[in-house]
Amino acid sequence: MAISSAPGKVYLFGEHAVVYGEPAIPCAIDLRARVQATARDDNRVRLTARDLSLNGFTVEFRGGHGDRPDVDVPDVLVEAAVGYVDGAIEHARELAGGTDDGLELTIESDIPLGAGLGSSAAVTVAAIDAVAREFGASPDKEVIADRAYQVESSVQSGEASRADTYCSTMGGVVRIEGSDCRRLGEPDIPFVLGYDGGAGDTGQLVAGVRSLRDRYPFAHATVEAVGELVERGETALADGDLAEVGRLMNFNHGLLAALGVSSRTLDDMVWAARDAGALGAKLTGAGGHGCIVALTDSSSVKTALEHAPSCEAAYEADLTPTGLHRE
Ligand code: MEV
């Protein structure tokens, strides 16, 4: 049996624009997904998932029944979740020399599914590592990050950046620009997250931004403006200037809203956090629904979010330096 875990993430800056080669700065947070892999004697794969903000489900595939699990979430999310795991297993088998032995996989995750906190990247990273190790391989982190990116890219029809998977594998704050991925460090940054209880469809949201960018020169320029903002954000972070980081987060949220990926619930939570004194607040991840991230260590921001009508849950989250971890 092999167990691996990997963290979720928030974007300080740069989601969506990173898909077009602009820089982005995501940062790993202390919510994790854990994957346990145990080889089976037959060639079936049995997946049990718990806590993916679902009631939990079990599904067998590849030589199994392939039944749709009986859970109250949109098909597209369940298909994507199973797609990430299936892709992860395929890559892990390859890393281990091509075995087709069966597998028992158990996934436990603290990270809400489709909420912009990198649940799919965390599950994919942890699954590739746990399965590869269970089959006798021991790939290094760079290899895991690259394989996890390939899985995300194929599930998201080629529309993925390396940001989520690299951040989840390495932990800390990272900077991504195309295939140039670097760890910036592990500064002490306090976050409060607001969650509207919903989920965004990453593929659809990315496609929406692409079509605006193709259609309007000013949408193209908006994507480039996000890149410029990220450069300034990197300097502010290096200087420890959290007030400037917060201002730039606010600006980034405005640009994401212009690109059509915010929503009433996300905007409401952003304003609740700002009104309560957060240094900055923005949506995180693909958008649509899901989470906002507020830069603050004030408990009044969490309380304000808990009372905001659009907010289903608020969490304090800290940056974690621990990426992929073998347990
Ligand atoms: C999703 O968490 C972030 C996006 O930028 C897509 C990606 O980078 O793959 C929207």
Image (tube, rainbow, N blue to C red):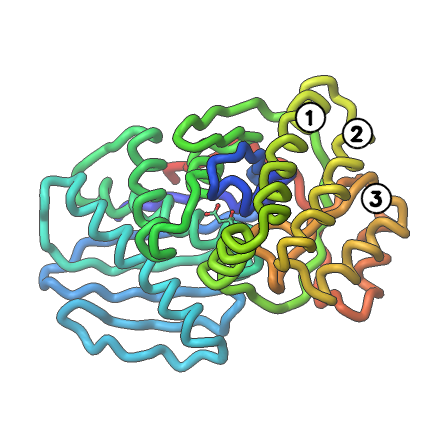
Crowd class of label 1 (few under 14; some 14 to 19; many from 20; radius 10 Å)? some
What percent of the width, then of the height, locates residue 45? Answer: 21, 64
Which mark sits nearer the N-terminus, 3 or 2? Answer: 2
Residue in the picture at 17% in, 44% down: 135
What percent of the width, then of the height, locates residue 85? Answer: 31, 57
Give the CA separation, mark 1 to mark 3: 20 Å
Residue 316 at least partly seen: no
Q: Judge whether 290 appears above or below 146 on screen.
A: below
Q: Is residue 231 left or right of residue 309?
A: left
Q: Is residue 113 left or right of residue 60?
A: right
Q: Residue 105's quadrant in the figure?
A: bottom left
What percent of the width, then of the height, locates residue 157? Answer: 34, 56
**Closer to us: 169 or 322:** 169
Mark 2: amino acid = Glu
Q: Are marks 1 and 2 in contact (CB under 8 Å)?
A: yes
Give the CA separation, mark 1 to mark 2: 9 Å
Residue in the picture at 84% in, 65% down: 307
Crowd class of label 2 (few under 14; some 14 to 19; many from 20; radius 10 Å)? some
Crowd class of label 3 (few under 14; some 14 to 19; many from 20; radius 10 Å)? many
> Depth-wise, is mark 1 or mark 2 nearer the camera?
1
Disc 3: which residue: 278
**Closer to us: 248 or 242:** 248
Residue in the picture at 82% in, 52% down: 273
Ligand 1 closer than 8 Å to the CB at disc 3? no
Residue in the picture at 9% in, 48% down: 99
Q: Judge whether 135 appears above or below 203 on screen.
A: above
Disc 2: which residue: 244
Q: Which mark is residue 232?
A: 1
